[in-house]
Image (spheres, grey):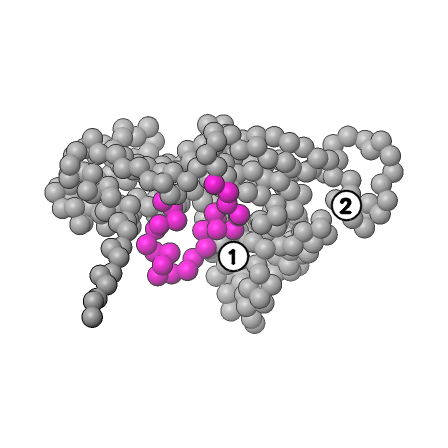
Amino acid sequence: MSTLSPEPLPLSPGAVFAAAVKKEGTKARATFNTTITEDFPGFKRRPRVAVRALFKVKTSDKPQARFWYETHPTTAPGANVQDVTLRPEAAFEFHFDQQPLRPTTGWIQVPQNLLDDPEALAQFIDFRLLVRLCTAENQALTIGKGGDRVRGILETPGVTRLPARKDPVSSLLAACAEVEQMGGSADGILINSVDYYQYLLGQNGLLSELTAMGIRICRTRMVSQGTVVVGDFTAGATIYDSGRSEIRFAEPPPGIFPREGLAVCGEIYEALAVHLPTHFFLASLRP
């Protein structure tokens, strides 16, 4: 009776980079045919939702993401539209555009003697560089300024600001209702962790009710305290993802570290295309 040998587990990004360092020292560079922000080991132990997990993702091997989008009217209508009060989307304007796939980069400094311990170096990369890169991606997708980097959802023209209602929960639920008034369904919430723990956790089953409706919640520092982003993330936007990443030694630009040291960066390449800015709302939680 023969026994099948188990298939070897794939190497983590940190293990791949540590193997490259063993061969090439500080000239090492590791490339991946995946987006390594999805490989942070902490996601396997604690199911925290990252910003990217709210959006649908499309792999793209092109330098530009070409996409459609709709906006509220910016010009006077040439004819009357039936039932526009009932269905505001009937008056939306249709557009086509493109966004370049841009890099998002995370940095760490590596103690020199760590280079002599491949196992410790691999763990350092997996648990520190990847989480720094995940944080950088959260920032880019939420408040990225665009230009030579990713433009985030809150920098996209057409996202509507809503005033606070009588209390934070009422403000949140009113924003969910506004998405439906535009013809969508709220399926994602971006909220600062302070507000999540203060206003949502332990509120008589509120989180269970939102989960049952298919609404996912991402806790992130990239949303200012006292505000919340609610939207139809599935229909309303797409991450165009290159499906490639790299980890390398590099000279950091000014303002990355407070002191000199041997630096390693991880980098991914993507664009955020917002098809329906009309379906995203930034709501104040408190009057």
Residue drawn where x is 41% and y is 60% of the image: 47
Q: Is residue 48 magenta?
A: yes
The disc placed on residue 88 is: 2
**Residue 111 located left or right of residue 248:** left
The disc placed on residue 217 is: 1
SS state under label 1 = strand
Q: Is residue 226 above or below residue 99?
A: below
Which span of residues is magenta-colored? 36-59
Name the foreground residue: 170 vs 63.
63
Measured from the top left, where is residue 64 in percent x and y? Answer: 51, 30
Residue drawn where x is 20% and y is 70% of the image: 1
- Whether the residues at callouts 1 and 2 have beta carbons within 8 Å, the answer is no
Measured from the top left, where is residue 108 in percent x and y? Answer: 28, 40
**Residue 207 located left or right of residue 11:** right
Residue drawn where x is 34% and y is 31% of the image: 255
Measured from the top left, where is residue 202 in percent x and y? Answer: 51, 69
Identified by mark 1, the residue type is: Ile
Identified by mark 2, the residue type is: Pro
Residue extending furthest front? 1
Q: Is residue 66 above or below residue 197?
A: above
Q: Residues within 10 Å of mark 2 (few under 14, many from 20)?
A: some
